[in-house]
């Protein structure tokens, strides 16, 4: 069933290619070839014939098939590709070399049939069928079946392009005939389900696409253009490259395709896209023929200087070195090689030998512009003076043997496979019969080194290890361009180390050497900014947005800004987090100095007043209202002035606990003394009433006890506060974003407000008592001054609360110090200033009689 299926497919393809008439489709059992079989371009008989298909001509002449009459014979047309001819003759050379060896196929002569596919799929399939089934003019069902089982050729070398190779591989795969291509790079051919008999000595475009993406990334190009051949080679290769480029973060401004047979308008449109683009780097996945047309069109109106990145399809073509448009181009090519004896073989061609082959005759006549047969009227007759060694074309140029070496390796691979089937260690059986699948099986296992030192083996996909040279087009001293290897790519190396540079790349703009070109859609975002993709454009097109408040980016092209740690703040450029300045009321602050001066001045005044009182301690004005409480009050006021100093300086654990407790206790001691003096005034006048013994219950011992009791209550509150949740220093990060406020935390807010509340309670009580005693008869009624002092005290601390809550940073502490000093100054001025005035400036009024209002002196 399989043989019948293969036979019917074979017959159908022969009819489509014009080899047999339509009648054979209906009755394949007996039919005759319609057209005379074409002779091979190059051939030699042997025990085993190896087929070869090369695109030696550029075009195939054809006409529209009407399917109503016999189709015309397929013919190649157009100019000859001398490079492909060199490939074909390299296969010849390899077979002659194998035949002369004693270690490979000893006693066996290999022959060859080399044919020209014109680069056309239809012709390539036709030739593959001819090579697979032979060219007898008659065939019948039996012959066809036998030829399906034992092909005319055991294996085939070719074709050069991917699209014809795909057609050949699909056809030969049906019969298991192995095909080894030297230049078909389409990654699709690695699919063994579709192309089970395909092998190649050139790496798959899968590797080349990855290598091209890596080289673009290596040089920092993120904005590129792309142009490709509109063929299997270009479309598949570019698809792989675009995928790899996307993974590398590279954006493509445009991706255009063109094939040399398409209308000129398509070529002009592609050229105009290139001219208008903003990308300065262009990746060209083109075959040489397509690249030739594109360069010719661009030369008409040269675009701005471009950096070309080329695939192996054109980057190693010497014919393009004549165009300065591609000066400085880089791309991956097959490693350069030397094949000993090949140049002599190519040049060993005389007119007589050329006449034996129509292909070589055409080459000779085309190269020397003469006619060997004398049949051309326009051309002169060749007279024998032509010197092939003087020729300078791609046929004779063996300085860059790259793809030629792949033909050499492919031919040797087939020879080794045949050797593995028909030979043992020393002998070969030329009469051995074998099926194509046996050669196919041997090809999977070949592993050898050629005479010129190149390793040949195939992986499970039929591909070799991918090794490329990175080629740079550099100017020579004579002004001409040349291929200069500047790096290597080896897929067998560890991941990330495949690409290595061996020398510097020379970048060119015309004939001027320049720095590495830049090709970006948007310039890099400096540190301190982040990238924001522009709407509707690729990710490589972005705006640089400054980092928000409190955020930085310390790398170029950051995708996002990161927030600084809580105790840090960005610098002006937003590229570094700096420690936030710590703010507190330090000793060297101007405000601190002013408050310190007032604090010390207040304490000094209190001490001076105490000294004056002590000196005049026996005078009536000092003895009035309990001089003991006056001295205690002056002592507490001194402490009040000095306790404000604990609020200045860097907060620490001890200072935070000391400042609030010292303030609370000293102020309670102060207010307690004032309260005691107020009660003394009330009791003193109550005692003057008949039958009153008030002073008996509030004498000096009771006064001291009341002061001590009131003060101990505050001490108890402070002890509980310090025990449960003491005030400790903490860094306030919330009030200001750009700096840290180092302040004393309240610990327990209840404790803090309990201390202030208790002081306020005593002050209010004192104010009430003093207010009640303000109209008692006396020339020097101290209750009046206590009332004024308590009014000032309460006013200060009532206004303190909102000011304390709303003041920022160090000013919170300053407000608290101000409240302490203001209330302290209010007490000392209101209570002691009048007495000091009398003692110092009106000593005549410092008498008991005057104080009781019995003298003639006007009461103060």
Image (tube, grey):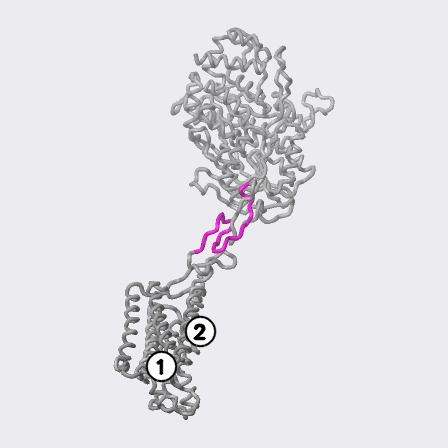
Q: Residue 179 in the image: x percent, y percent? A: 49, 24
Residue 156 spot, x, y in % from top left:
50, 23
Majority secondary structure in the magenta region: loop
Compute the Cα span from label 1 to label 2: 24 Å
Occupied quadrant, residue 643:
bottom left
Is residue 561 in the magenta section?
A: yes
Instruction: Say few, some or many: other residues with alpha carbon within 10 Å of mark 2 (under 14 / 14 to 19 / 20 or more).
Output: many
Q: Which residues are magenta?
A: 538-564
Q: Is residue 134 above or below residue 802?
A: above
Which corner quadrant holds the N terminus? top left
Q: Is residue 176 above or below residue 345?
A: above
Task: Check disc 2 and report the residue beneath it.
Answer: 592
Asked whether, in this view, residue 538 is left or right of residue 191, the answer is right
Based on the displayed image, in which of its 4 quarters is residue 42 positioned? top right
Q: Disc 1 marks which residue?
A: 634
Which residue is located at x 49 percent, y 35 percent? 207
């Amino acid at each position: 069933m399989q043989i019948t299926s293969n036979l019917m497919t074979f017959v159908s393809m022969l009819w489509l290619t014009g080899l047999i008439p339509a009648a054979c489709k209906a009755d394949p059992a007996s039919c005759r070839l319609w057209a005379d079989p074409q002779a091979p371009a190059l051939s030699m008989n042997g025990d085993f014939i190896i087929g070869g298909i090369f695109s030696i001509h550029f075009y195939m002449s054809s006409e529209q098939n009407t399917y109503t009459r016999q189709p015309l014979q397929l013919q190649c047309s157009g100019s000859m590709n001398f490079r492909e001819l060199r490939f074909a003759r390299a296969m010849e050379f390899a077979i002659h070399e194998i035949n002369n060896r004693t270690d490979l196929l000893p006693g066996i002569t290999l022959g060859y049939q080399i044919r020209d596919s014109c680069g056309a799929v239809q012709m390539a399939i036709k030739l593959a069928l001819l090579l697979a089934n032979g060219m007898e003019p008659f065939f019948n069902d039996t012959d066809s079946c036998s030829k399906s089982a034992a092909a005319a050729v055991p294996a085939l070398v070719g074709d050069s392009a991917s699209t014809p190779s795909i057609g050949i591989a699909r056809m030969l795969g049906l019969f298991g005939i192995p095909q080894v291509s030297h230049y078909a790079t389409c990654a699709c051919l690695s699919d063994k389900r579709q192309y089970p008999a395909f092998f190649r000595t050139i790496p798959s475009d899968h590797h080349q696409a990855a290598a091209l993406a890596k080289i673009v990334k290596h040089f920092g190009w993120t904005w590129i253009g792309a142009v490709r051949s509109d063929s299997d080679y270009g479309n598949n290769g570019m698809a792989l490259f675009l995928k790899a480029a996307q993974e590398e973060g590279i954006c493509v401004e445009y991706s255009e395709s063109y094939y040399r047979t398409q209308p000129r308008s398509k070529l002009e449109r592609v050229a105009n896209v290139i001219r208008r683009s903003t990308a300065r780097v262009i990746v060209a996945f083109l075959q040489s023929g397509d690249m030739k047309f594109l360069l010719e069109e661009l030369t008409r109106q040269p675009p701005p200087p471009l950096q070309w990145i080329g695939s192996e399809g054109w980057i190693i073509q010497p014919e393009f070195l004549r165009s300065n448009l591609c000066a400085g181009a880089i791309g991956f090519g097959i490693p350069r090689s030397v094949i000993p004896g090949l140049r002599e073989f190519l040049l060993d061609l005389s007119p007589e030998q050329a006449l034996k082959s129509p292909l070589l005759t055409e080459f000779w006549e085309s190269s020397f512009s003469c006619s060997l047969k004398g049949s051309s009227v326009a051309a002169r007759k060749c007279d024998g003076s032509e010197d092939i060694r003087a020729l300078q074309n791609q046929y004779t140029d063996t300085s860059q043997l790259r793809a030629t070496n792949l033909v050499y390796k492919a031919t040797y691979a087939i020879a080794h496979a045949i050797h593995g089937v028909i030979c043992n260690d020393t002998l070969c059986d030329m009469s051995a019969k074998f099926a194509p699948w046996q050669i196919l099986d041997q090809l999977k296992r070949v592993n050898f080194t050629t005479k010129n030192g190149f390793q040949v083996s195939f992986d499970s996909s039929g591909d070799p290890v991918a090794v490329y040279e990175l080629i740079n087009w550099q100017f020579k001293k004579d002004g001409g361009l040349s291929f200069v290897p500047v790096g290597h790519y080896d897929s067998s190396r560890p991941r990330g180390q495949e690409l290595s540079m061996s020398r510097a790349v020379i970048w060119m703009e015309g004939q001027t050497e320049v720095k590495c070109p830049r090709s970006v859609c948007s310039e890099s975002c400096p540190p301190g900014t982040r990238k924001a993709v522009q709407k509707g454009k690729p990710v490589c097109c972005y705006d640089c947005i400054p980092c928000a408040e409190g955020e930085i980016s310390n790398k170029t092209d950051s995708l996002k800004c990161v927030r600084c740690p809580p105790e840090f703040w960005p610098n002006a450029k937003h590229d570094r987090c700096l420690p936030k300045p710590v703010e507190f009321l330090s000793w060297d602050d101007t405000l601190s100095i002013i408050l310190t001066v007032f604090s010390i001045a207040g304490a000094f005044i209190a001490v001076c007043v105490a000294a004056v009182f002590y000196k005049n301690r026996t005078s009536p004005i000092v003895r009035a209202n309990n001089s003991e409480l006056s001295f205690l009050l002056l002592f507490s006021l001194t402490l009040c002035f000095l306790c404000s100093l604990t609020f200045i300086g860097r907060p620490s654990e001890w200072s935070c606990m000391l400042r609030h407790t010292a303030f609370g206790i000293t102020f309670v001691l102060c207010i307690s003394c004032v309260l005691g003096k107020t009660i003394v005034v009330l009791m003193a006048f109550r005692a003057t009433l008949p039958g009153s013994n008030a002073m008996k219950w509030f004498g000096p011992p009771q006064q001291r006890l009341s002061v001590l009791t009131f003060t101990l209550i505050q001490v108890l509150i402070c002890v509980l506060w310090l025990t449960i949740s003491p005030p400790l220093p903490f860094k306030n990060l919330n009030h200001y974003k750009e700096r840290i406020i180092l302040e004393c935390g309240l610990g327990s807010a209840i404790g803090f407000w309990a201390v202030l509340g208790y002081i306020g309670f005593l002050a209010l009580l004192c104010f009430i008592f003093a207010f009640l005693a303000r109209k008692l008869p006396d020339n020097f009624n101290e209750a009046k001054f206590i009332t004024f002092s308590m009014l000032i005290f309460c006013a200060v601390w009532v206004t303190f609360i909102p000011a304390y809550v709303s003041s920022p940073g160090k000013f919170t502490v300053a407000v608290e110090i101000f409240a302490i000093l203001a209330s302290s100054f209010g007490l000392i001025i209101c209570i002691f200033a009048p007495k000091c005035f009398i003692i110092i400036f009106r000593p005549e009024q410092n008498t008991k009689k005057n104080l009781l209002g019995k003298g003639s002196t006007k009461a103060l």
